[in-house]
Image: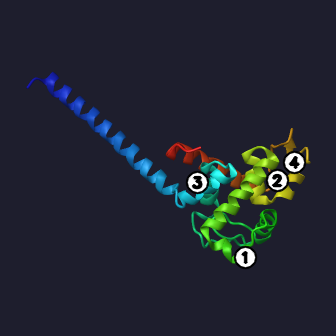
């Protein structure tokens, strides 16, 4: 076998190995990304998305950020369930619907997702943009209204500087997770 042919075979083998490595990397990274961004409760999410006009990617992103899909999650301030609803917020939403649930019902994924999605819809309707709705979901509706009235924090009705680092980080996490859900699952 000639020296040129040996070089050709070596180069071809290296290119094939690189190609197979790239394919393996893409497959493994996609698998890992899907494991980190699950779509548990997909039917409940789809039902609530359709009922309230909230993109599924947003609902999944909020659930992932709030509770990592743990229906028994409770925050240090008392937010409950998958979408980490506060009891006062839940009661406020109940007053809007006229439905009669108890705080215990927040442990039910169907109730929690429905009311968490309803809250997202209300916040989006109020503010007209998801980043501000996410900030209000985390920090509270009235607090964000105050921020929007402050020219140091808001310009033209848009938050340009969120005063709470926790809320600023929360908004970034939800935005990133929603984009990843859209990319991974080709959902709105």
Taking the spot 60% from the left edge, 73% from the top edge, the residue there is: 72
Secondary structure of the residue carrying tag 3 is: helix
Residue placed most toward the observer, 139 or 44: 44
In the rendered structure, find residue 46 and report the number of the disc placed on it: 3
Where residue 84 sits, quadrant-wise, is bottom right
SS class, disc 1: loop
Disc with the residue nearer the chain's start (1 vs 4): 1
Badge 2 or badge 1: first in the primary sequence: 1
Does residue 11 appear to the left or right of 148 in the view shown?
left
Q: Which residue is mark 2?
A: 163
> What's the mark number on residue 148?
4
Question: Which of the two discs, 2 and 1, sits closer to the camera?
Answer: 1
Spatial CA span between label 2 and label 1? 34 Å
**Residue 2 x/y as whole percent:** 10, 23
The residue carrying mark 1 is 102
N-terminal of the pair, mark 2 or mark 4, is 4
Where on the picture, by quarter, is residue 26?
top left
3 is higher (above) or lower (below) than 176:
above
* Quadrant assignment for the N terminus: top left
Q: Is residue 26 left or right of residue 74?
A: left
Gap between marks 2 and 4 measured at Cα? 11 Å
Q: Return the x and y of residue 157 as percentages of the image width and height.
A: 85, 42
- The mark lying in front, picked from 2 and 3, is 3
């Amino acid at each position: 076998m000639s020296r040129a042919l040996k070089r050709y075979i070596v180069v071809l083998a290296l290119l094939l190995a690189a190609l197979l490595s790239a394919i393996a990397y893409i497959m493994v990274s996609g698998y890992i990304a899907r494991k980190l961004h699950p779509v548990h409760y997909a039917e409940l999410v789809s039902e609530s998305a359709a009922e309230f006009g909230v993109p599924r990617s947003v609902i999944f992103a909020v659930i992932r950020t709030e509770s990592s899909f743990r229906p028994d999650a409770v925050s240090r301030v008392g937010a409950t369930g998958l979408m980490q609803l506060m009891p006062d917020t839940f009661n406020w939403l109940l007053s809007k619907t006229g439905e009669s649930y108890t705080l215990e019902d927040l442990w039910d994924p169907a109730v929690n997702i429905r009311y968490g999605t309803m809250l997202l819809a209300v916040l989006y309707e109020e503010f007209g943009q998801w980043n501000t709705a996410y900030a209000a979901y985390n920090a509270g509706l009235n607090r964000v209204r105050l921020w929007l009235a402050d020219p140091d924090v808001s310009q033209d009705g848009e938050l340009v500087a969120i005063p709470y680092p926790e809320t600023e980080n929360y908004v970034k996490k939800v935005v990133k997770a929603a984009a990843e859900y859209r990319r991974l699952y080709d959902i709105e």
